[in-house]
Image (cartoon, grey):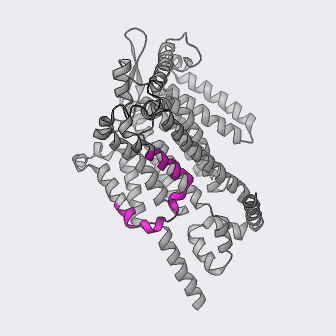
Amino acid sequence: MVLAVGALTLSRARLSTQTVSTFTFLFYLYFIVDYFLRFPARIPGYSSLRPTLIGILILSTLLFVQREKFKGRFDDPVFRGFFLLVGYIILTLPLVEWPGSVIRGNWETFLKAVVFLFFTALTIDTEKRLKWFVAVFVFCQIFRVLEPLYLNITQGYWGSATHLQGAEFANRLSGAPADVINPNELGFVIATVIPFLHYLLWPKGWFSKGVYLVLIPLLLYALILTMSRGGFIALLVVAFFVFKESRRKAGLIALGVIVVVCAFSVMTPIQKDRYLSLIDRDTAGGASAEGRIRGMVNEFKLGLSRPIVGHGLGTTPEAKTHKLGSQQASHNLYAEVLIELGIVGFIIFIMFLVKIAKKLKSVRAKMTNIVSGSGNYFLRLNKVLLCVFWMYVVYSINYWGLSQYYWYLFAGLVIAFGRLIPSVDEIERSEGLNGQDAVNHRYRLASSLQNRHPREARAWKSLNENQERC
């Protein structure tokens, strides 16, 4: 009895130093819902409270008060890559072309984006919280797609239009009236959420499969209505990863043919022309595709006009206006980074992305040696993150993002996910009574391996020891 009480006390003591308070995590979930579902645009008078800024201040204060729980967290390679990027931006601020523009307002947009890295990495510190965060995030993205789709079907809502040859315009589906996303951004949201649905819902029971079969056609139809060529390319990246991971490749090819035939059957001639312009420049949409490519080339040339430190954070529209005579952007993240941070900053940002990729690769190596089978949530989530990472890499050719949330939230999720995979030392400590009680609460994956997969756990431990000696 005394030994059991002592073990329980040790478990609670360890837990208190490792996890943030429940209130902090729940408030971050509220912040996520408020941010993505745009409560300020839906609730009268709510915007006057500056909820995003207030939410950032509250979360920052809560995390600062609990800073003792984060010892060693910032040694993560992804965190170090990010700190290098921020340090470079600060040190080169006096040398950029328009430091005044950065100070007057551009830093605030960047700050609102990068906080997602810290909030996600620091508040997701148990497996249960990881699952809750993923569920809430995916729900918000699905809602952002289904709301404008519902309005389109019931009220004829579109939200945006694109210019065709001559004086004609074609309607394109964008975010709902309360949202702020254009058709390309809505396509980005669709391409982001599909991997989560495919890997997390389809391998489960019949109810989950039913939800998947209802949602996927709706999301694909919404993508057609956006006429987002970038979103279509992003979807191809997702399809490639699904195809590569599948053991039923012949069946997937047949399913892909059916999906393409069904998609073309519901497209209007303008929508067909828009997507065909990706491979045929003689179509009516070919001119806009050529214009987008020329815009990207011009932006890279603009970035090389000030190659060392760039024009300054957030100054891409300003630089284009002054030097190219047009503020219209081609929406290319890599050109944006080159324009604003120069070649050195560009290399640092790419190194940041490389560190994320390496983190995912190392986590996947551990997961593969621990658990086999598609039934494991963590193995499936790792597949999601790998797929989304490469989709982001490709879609960033057609999407800006240095001061957008998506790379930073993703990096925070990767950090949190990687930290929840137990290390060799934690597995060793879990072999003892006290260590097992302390680890089981937070590392249910480790304890389940000890109980259900002892051979895999011992093999994983041996593999890591060999890697350390090498």
| Left or right: 6, with 466 as reference point | left
Residue 378 sits inside the magenta stretch: no
Q: Give the quadrant of the C terminus.
A: bottom right
Identify whether 306 is placed above or below 70.
above
* Residue 61, quarter of picture: bottom left
Q: Residue at x 42, y 47 (%)?
A: 114
Q: What stretch is highlighted in magenta?
A: 61-87
Task: Give the image quarter of residue 315.
Answer: top left
Q: Position of residue 316 (x, y in %)?
A: 39, 29
Residue at 64 percent across and 64 percent down: it is 423
Q: In this view, does 24 lie above or below 194?
A: below
Q: Percent x, y for residue 96?
A: 38, 34
The x and y percentages for residue 355 are 58, 47
User: Does 78 lie within the magenta span?
Assistant: yes
Q: Front-most of 168 and 20?
A: 20
Q: Is residue 111 visible?
A: yes
Q: Is the magenta stretch mostly helix, strand or loop?
A: helix
Where's residue 459, x and y in %?
77, 63
Looking at the image, the residue that sits furthest to the bottom is 2
What count of labels does the image hold? 0
